[in-house]
Image: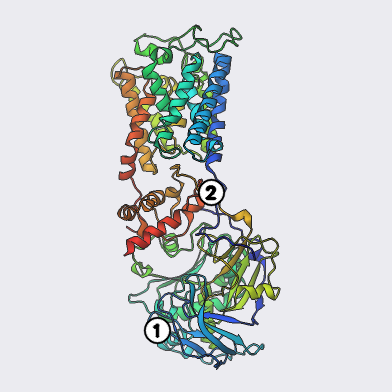
Amino acid sequence: MLRVEEHKSPQHNLSCEKFLNPQRLYLPLSQHTGRPSQACVKPQDIAECAQVIALEDGHISARLHAPKKIKIISIDDWYHPILKKAKCIIAEPIETEEHKFIPREKIGAIGKEALLQIIRDSGIVGMGGAAFPTHVKLRPPKKIETLIINGCECEPYLASDYRLMVEKLDEIFKGIEIICKIIEPREVIFVVEDNKTEARKKLHLAFSLKKYKLPNFSLEILKTAYPQGGEKQLIYSTKKSKVPSGGLPLDVGCIVHNVATCFAIYEAVYFDKPLIERLVTFAGDALVSPKNVWVKIGTPLNELFDKGVLQFKTEPKKIICGGPMMGIALDNLNYPVLKGTGGFLFLSKDYLLGEEGPCIRCGSCVRECPMSLMPTLIDLASRNENWEQALIYGSADCIECGICSYVCPTNRRLVQSIKQAKIKTLK
Amino acid sequence: MNKLTVSYSPHLHTNQSCAKIMWSVFASLLPAGIAAIFIFGAAALWVILLGVISALVTEGLLQYFNKKKITLSDGSAALTGLLLSYNLPANSPWWLVVIGSFFSVFIGKQIFGGLGQNIFNPALVGRVFLMTCWPKYMTNFMKPLDAGINFFKSFNYDAVTAATPLMMAKEGKAVIDISYWDLFLGKHGGCLGEVCILALLAGALFLLLKKYISWHIPIIYIATVGVFSWIFGSKGLFSGDFLFSILSGGLILGAFFMATDYVTSPLTRKGQAIFAAGCGILTVVIRLWGGYPEGVSYAILMMNAATPIIDRYTKNRIFGR
């Protein structure tokens, strides 16, 4: 692991703003790992705020809700950051006022199964990026020993998890209590990196007050490094146990939840509020000022510029959905915010990558790879279409964190060709 | 909105570049070159300049005629030329330098496909070629100047010559009247860049601090040479003068600046340790029982050849396996 340039300032210290009144909403049916959900509304239908507009398809899938009172315009292909184009419910909000969610009563009395049902019905997915349906993750086939709460947010620029920890820590803890009630772990570890100054103070305070009912609760402050927030790295850093190659965290008795997911669980259980908004960091040197903004899921980027929430300082040359290390480059501003999107970056020409040179075998990628692979040799094998060789050097275990390309002095596009090998060897 | 660039992640990058690394290594070698000029006079300067310029010209012409992108600014050709000149006597005739540089860049590097593709250290390929073809010139070392005398005589093959300390040791001259201090400062015959250990160590320290090289290869290499020279001393086992064997010859130059060449050394630390130990053992074997008084260049070249196989057997253990 490596300390990469953080670029967290000034986002870390910016209070959250709100932008909850877009004119159009684009809600892709596939915002999660697993099968796309199935639309249960038709064009011209009116849906109330928080009404289900698409149902899950099979076990590993997630519901979709109307973020506001909306009129469905069409169900058509639209821009999708990951899939490029995908089926999407296109809708028009018909009410500017915010819906009031009524607090649920007698939360302590709700049983395990009922809680799981609420989480499933709220369409909650992992909000750290992978967007795996949370209700599936909370019903593990094995006993979970350790619940790890991931507050690392190791991607440069992004500050949405950090702001959430600073502004909504109490709510996050209530979300964790619910998770504990469901999976009954032996211990809970809340992990943050040491660059999360303000959040650390609040966490220490919460820890010393012992306000929350958490089994064997401990706080772990890790060294700031990338990719510290990766599941396998996080479990290794806190528990010193290695998730076996091709395995899952639960193979070592662990489960990892992102802080934003905990917050979403809190809202679902305490207010019956489904996952319809999230905190997103907008940053990058092409913006006049970066912002952390609460937006409705489905808000397209261009609305934020049209409404003056964001302004360009210089011409952007790169727009990225996600963080700079693993994010996806976009080709226009029509892309919507998804459940798993923690940020968007707008970068000027200074961030365009230089020309690719030959590998000089400096070994930086080999030394820095958090999965201990041989990136440059996988790259070589991949370029020669020698997939077997690529597999020997570890292509199947690549987590695509981007460290190898980040450190390469000759700008080799290592992740790209390793990904190619990964796809080929999976078949 | 104008055109946006869509490329694969990551979108962030260190400001490290190949040119930065190469020119840093180049700069770290300069103290040794300056020391050589003090020791051998202007002759050393001309050999160094000619070595660098002819390497650059060779690379430029080859890339031009092969219709490849001309990459002289990445510093790799200049570095090869510099290292080659450091491996020559200060009194080399001018054509020897030019042929050596040409051979280094052409056969040592470009014929394999250019930067990053070569199996052997290009500068050493050039040196060994010259050793084979013109041994007379390559083993005729100029005597260090007495202050100021003949400072400006260049390419002067007829200079007063002196055997290197290792040559004297090989010939069995019992006591060599040279102190460790003189060895350390470079007041003796030898290739122009290898003599001043002090200057070389200053450059090496810079590279280590900048993390352009790691300690693994040089320290293990030098330690192996020290230990084996001590064990197999001329007066029986465990009687060798290990300090002498470390300070004489091209070991310091080779260990810090040539064995550490990225392209021709193994990728992993484990591999590098094996590589360095191999270099050390081969160096001692050649010095003690081989036909040459010095074995650093042959040892490194042989281990260069072994690098692919070392890489194959020392690959990292994948996380979670």
Q: Nearer the viewer, residue A386 or A228?
A: A386
| Residue that mark 1 sits on | A57
Determine the image quadrant of residue B210. top right
Q: Position of residue B115 (x, y in %)?
A: 46, 38
Where on the picture, by quarter, is residue A311? bottom right
Would residue A391 appear left or right of B248 to someone viewing this image? left
Secondary structure found at label 1? loop
Check the image and report above or below for A401 versus B24: below
Q: Is residue B284 above or below residue B24?
A: above
Circle 2 — which element?
A: loop
Q: Which mark is residue A355?
A: 2
> Could you classify mark 2 by the number of other residues whose Cα lies within 10 Å: few (under 14), some (14-19), or many (20 or more)?
few
Residue A274 versus residue B94: which sits nearer the camera? Answer: B94
Return the x and y of residue A24 as percentages of the image width and height: 61, 82
Asked if residue A131 can be seen in this view, the reply is yes
Residue visible at 30% across and 21% down? B232
Q: Do labels 1 and 2 touch, CB within 8 Å?
A: no
Left or right for B316, reference B207: left
Tell me the subunit letter for badge 1: A
Point out residue A195 in the picture as x, y percentages from the top left corner. 58, 60
